[in-house]
Amino acid sequence: MNNSMKRIIPLKIERYCKKNTIPESALLHELVAETYASTAFPDMQIGHIEGAFLRMLVHLIRAKRVLELGTFTGYSSLAMAEALPEDGKLITCDIDQEATEIAKKYWSRSPHGKKIELRLGYALETLKTIEGVFDVVFIDADKENYINYWELCIPKTRSGGLLVVDNVLWSGGALDPKDETDRAIAEFNEHVSNDKRVEVVMLPIRDGVSLAWKF
């Protein structure tokens, strides 16, 4: 999500949901402030409610290994790492060295930062070098490659594991595609809904989140 996109959930409702959601840690709160002060598109950050949702998913399935595509300033990585056990591992992939420098600064200040490993480079290539299977996969990278990411991540997700995909509504663009990104999201959503390897539910959280359980 970026700051040029339309808000789907009314601000008043979002604030009420935040009020009734587990508070974000002080460090995450500080990270939000720096992201808004230091980056051109701070709304790319997932935010409090979605971060709490991801954290809860990691808790619920007792995940030990998490794979993330799209790090930005590290909010989602840290939110999920907070839910991992001491021997848990989160691998996150991104190409933006400047944004991930902010992420690394905050990870280094958290007792959970040691669980996070950053892989800089194009995710389509990085994914080919990552071995093993994961309990949770979170996809929030360039939208035009969503289907490619999905197909590379499905074999890396364990049976009974979860794949979580952000921005699947794309400010409503997925419903009536007008440009390349709209069409990419719409095609991805159809691809996932027809994928017999998973059971999927699309949720109107933030800019739309698809949650898929792998058979």
Image (tube, grey):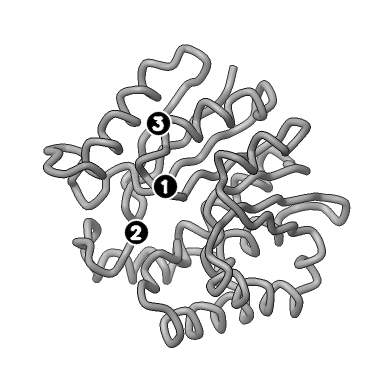
| Vertical order, 180 against 110 (above or below) | above
Tell me the kind of residue under disc 3: Val
Callout 1: few (<14), some (14-19), or many (20+) C-alpha neighbours within 10 Å?
A: many
| Vertical order, 14 against 212 (above or below) | below
Distance of label 1 from label 2 (alpha carbons): 8 Å
Callout 3: few (<14), some (14-19), or many (20+) C-alpha neighbours within 10 Å?
A: few
Residue closest to the far top: 196
In primary-sequence order, the first of circles 1 and 2 is: 2
Which residue is rendered at x = 65% and y = 29% of the image?
157
| Vertical order, 125 against 48 (above or below) | above
Which residue is rendered at x = 88% and y = 51% of the image?
87
Residue closest to the far right: 87
- Say the numbered circle drawn on residue 1: 2
Closer to the camera: disc 2 or disc 3? 2
Cβ atoms at labels 1 and 2 below 8 Å apart = yes
Identify which residue, 150 or 161, lies in the foreground: 150
Identify which residue, 22 or 145, lies in the foreground: 145
Residue closest to the far bottom: 37
In primary-sequence order, the first of circles 2 and 3 is: 2
Identify which residue, 27 or 1, lies in the foreground: 1
- Say the numbered circle drawn on residue 201: 3
Whole-percent x, y for residue 104 in the image: 68, 73
| Residue at mark 1 | 166
Tell me the kind of residue under disc 2: Met
